[in-house]
Image: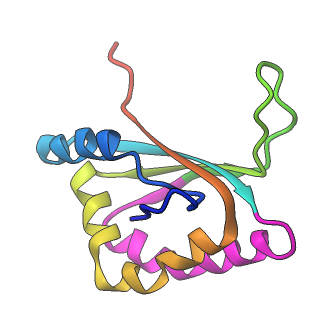
Amino acid sequence: MATSAADPERLNEQGFGEFAARAGDGRPVVMLNLLRFKPDGGQERYMEYGVAVAPSLEKVGGRIVWAGEPASPLLGEQGWDMVALVEYPSRQAFLEMIGSPEYQEIGHLRTEALELGELHPMDAADG
């Protein structure tokens, strides 16, 4: 995972720790991906990442729920080039994927593509 302050995906260590602490709960998790691409090739590089990560995602039982280009925000001012929802069968599955040797070889493609990226784990609402 990224750690440099200049990195567009700087790791939130507290958030990652809380996420990892729940890795054994066995509940599905949906990851909200907010993506702003670098100019001059960032979107193409991200598409390359998408193709490369697909086997790793499938291996852990993950799936893309939705991906698309958002319109201008109705509330707030932060705009994104792409938003994606990716479901994993558990937090542990996500951790296994990003820790795998296969992912370690391709993870740089995501970072190289993004000017800014946010990743928000979400649980289903009770009720």
The reply to whether the magenta stretch includes residue 85 is: no
Q: Nearer the viewer, residue 69 or 66?
A: 69
Q: Is residue 103 visible?
A: yes
Kindly identify the residue that appears in the image at 36 percent across and 32 percent down.
123
Split into 4 quadrants, where in the image is the N terminus? bottom left
Q: Position of residue 4 (x, y in %)?
A: 47, 62
Asked if residue 38 lies left or right of residue 23, the reply is: right
| Relative image position of residue 125 (x, y in whole percent) | 38, 21
Query: Which colour style is shown?
Result: rainbow
Does residue 90 appear in the picture of this structure? no
Vertical order, 96 against 31 (above or below): below
Relative side of 22 to 83, left or right: left
Residue lying at 58% horizontally and 60% vertically, measured from the top left: 6
- Of 122 and 114, which appears nearest the observer? 114
Classify the position of the C terminus by image quarter: top left
Image quarter of residue 49: bottom right
Chief secondary structure of the magenta portion = helix
Q: Position of residue 105 (x, y in %)?
A: 42, 87
Q: How many marks?
A: 0
Residue extent of the magenta highlight: 38-64
Q: Residue furthest left?
A: 24
Residue at image point 76% right, 71% down: 42
| x and y percentages locating residue 22 in the rendered image | 18, 40
**Most distant residue in the front direction:** 5
Please indicate whether residue 85 sits to the left or right of residue 24 in the image. right
Q: Is residue 30 above or below residue 1?
A: above
What residue is at 77 percent from the left and 76 percent from the top?
44
Reply yes or no: does residue 48 show up in magenta: yes
